[in-house]
Image (tube, grey):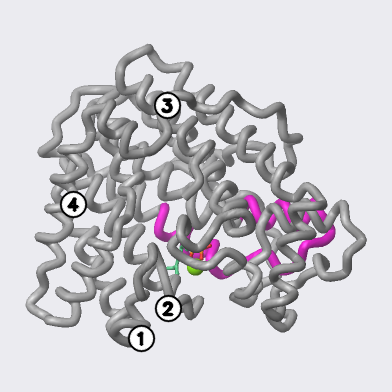
Amino acid sequence: MRAYDSQTTNTPQSGTNGTPHGPATSTAGQPLPAADTFNSLQQLFDQAHLTSDLAAIQSLLLERAASQSTPIAASGAHIIRSGGKHLRAALVLLAARLGTYDFAQVRHAAAAVELIHTASLVHDDLVDGTERRRGSATIHTRWDNDVALMLGDYFFALAAAEMAMCADSRVITFYAHAVQTIVEGELRPVTAVAPFDAALERYLYKTGAKTASLFEAGCKAGAALSGGSDATIEALGHYGYALGLAFQIIDDMLDFTGSESLLGKPPGNDLRQGTITLPLICAAAGSSNPLLQRTSDAPPPTEAEVARIIEEVIRAEGISQASAYADMYTRQAIARLEALPASPARHALIHLTRSIQTRQT
Ligand code: FPP
Ligand code: MG
């Protein structure tokens, strides 16, 4: 996507008090130990007794998507059944379990976050012209552009209806803020790999906007709906934001190191779309290879160039440097949790965070 402005906006202002999260130019720290027993999110959900609640969220989503319009009902069921992990819903539920857990209440906030996320992916695939997601045809590919546009809008409306059913109106504020931030972030991409500081600042802004803001909102919604204090809601917001940054950095690393069978989409997609991410920014700063000196408005690289760029990014330690940033944000996220009283839900959130740090898909 091209840049629409030349403003000097910093890391997204996050939370109702507008406090920015995390220093945009902090030095990355030492790697964290990997999670040992929690090898997959599903295993973690089982151990945290989340599986049946998440299945109930999936049923709720399918029920809500049963529109009178045949294309909306069919495409909605297609995307809901496409195998999303429901990580954002899990965060809402676990955040709520830190307080007084009432699934009948919090399920609306968990469904809303998944509907917003899914809507944003449907629109994103349309804008990016992506053909496959999670191993299946994208909505605009299997149906058409109109259906993708309308399905995204329909899901936003469904999300609004879920929010309206939440007992705490702050949930609407949290999610509305996140959606505004996502949209603003989409229109301010990273335009060049250099200079490094500017590229890093823009990358963290964009990543904070497109991914971390919704993690933050979901965590705050869960905390608010379970009677959390203002301080707990704020802490959970900071946790979600840092986790979202780590999650997206790892996603961007996997675009270089993953395989199509694991990712459900071909690796190198970001390069083909002219999207500049952290591994490329880090590698370009330490390599004299002109192939890495990319700008977002340059013609897309050929398939042979994509393969050579991936090789050079790995050789120039772009992955290991990006990984150090992911570790730093993971540590920040865990520190936010460790400031809260110990509980099974806090334990599960800490392991969820570590499991994300070591994820391969
Ligand atoms: C995925 O990023 C993109 C998003 C999570 C946000 C996309 C947002 C919009 C298109 C604006 C409309 C959305 C709202 C909320 C109004 P990516 O392309 O890097 O990831 P991918 O590889 O999974 O496609
Ligand atoms: Mg995309």
Circle number at residue 126: 2
**Of discs 3 and 2, which sits in the foreground?**
3
The percent coordinates of residue 178 (x first, y second) are 41, 53
Label 2 sits on what residue type? Leu
Asked if the residue under mark 3 is in contact with the one under mark 1, i.e. CB atoms within 8 Å, the reply is no
Residue that label 4 marks: 58
Measuring 41% from the left and 49% from the top, which residue is drawn there? 214
Asked if the residue under mark 4 is in contact with the one under mark 2, i.e. CB atoms within 8 Å, the reply is no
Q: Marks 2 and 4, how far apart in space?
A: 24 Å
Label 1 sits on what residue type? Asn
Q: What range of the chain is rendered magenta?
A: 178-205
The percent coordinates of residue 224 (x first, y second) are 28, 33
Measuring 48% from the left and 80% from the top, which residue is drawn there? 129
Q: The N terminus appears in which quarter of the rendering?
A: bottom right
Residue that label 3 marks: 351
Q: Residues within 10 Å of mark 4 (few under 14, many from 20)?
A: many
Measuring 69% from the left and 45% from the top, which residue is drawn there? 322
Measuring 23% from the left and 45% from the top, which residue is drawn there? 109
Total labels: the figure holds: 4
